[in-house]
Image (spheres, rainbow, N blue to C red):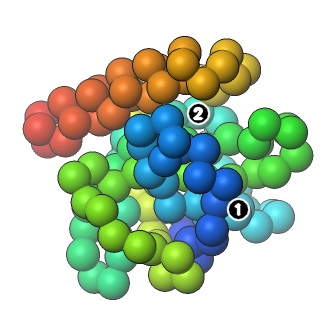
Amino acid sequence: MKLTLSGRVEKGEGMATRLGCPTANIAIEQGVLIPALGVYVGEAEIEGARHNALICISDGRTGYNLKMEVHLLGVKQDLIDKRIDVVLYDKLRDIIPFPGDEEMAVMIAEDMEQARLWAQGR
């Protein structure tokens, strides 16, 4: 699978950062075709630079807020208001109900490790 989604980075709630995985938050516009909700590995292009990424497409905790959260592997920079193109390559897992902060932090750490292994194997 290879699918590209694009959007402008918005300020999020900071939850992913608190859980050890800062993300660029992108609202998905109505009418845009997306793959199944889930956690993916792929690439993100920002201002001409490509980065390996861990990507989560979910409907938020309320179930009504379709969004994409992108964690750039090994990159720390402020991305608010920047345009980002995201290429999804492989799905790691489905979205699960939020189990609590501690359990979610463990799952995210496992996702980040899988994404790093994927990036090394490319």
- For the residues labelled 1 and 2, the Cα–Cα distance comes to 14 Å
Q: Position of residue 54 (x, y in %)?
A: 39, 44
Q: Quadrant of residue 101?
A: top right
Where is 74 relative to 106, above or below? below
x, y percentage for residue 22? 44, 51
Mark closer to the chain start, 1 or 2: 1
Give the residue pinned by disc 1: 28
Residue 10 as seen in the image, left or right of residue 17? right
Image quadrant occupied by the N terminus = top left
Q: Is residue 122 visible?
A: yes
Please say if 113 is above or below 85: above
The residue located at (59%, 52%) in the rendering is 14
**In what element is the residue under mark 1?**
loop
Residue type, numbered disc 1: Ile
Q: Is residue 46 left or right of residue 66?
A: left
User: Residue 50, percent across and down?
Assistant: 25, 68
The residue that mark 2 highlights is 38
Would you identify the image quadrant in which residue 20 lies?
top left
Residue at point 49% right, 47% down?
17
Q: What is the number of callouts on the image? A: 2
Please state the horizontal and vertical placement of residue 43, each as a whole percent of the image.
33, 56
For the point 36% across and 76% down, which residue is it?
Answer: 46
Q: Is residue 118 visible?
A: no
Q: Please state which of residues 4 and 73 is positioned toward the viewer in this rendering.
A: 73
Viewer-side residue, 17 vs 112: 17
Badge 1: few (under 14), some or many (20 or more) residues near its Cα, within 10 Å?
many
Report helix, strand or loop for mark 2: strand
Q: Amino acid at mark 2?
A: Gly
Towards the viewer: 17 or 54: 17
The image shows residue 13, relative to residue 89, as above or below, that is: below
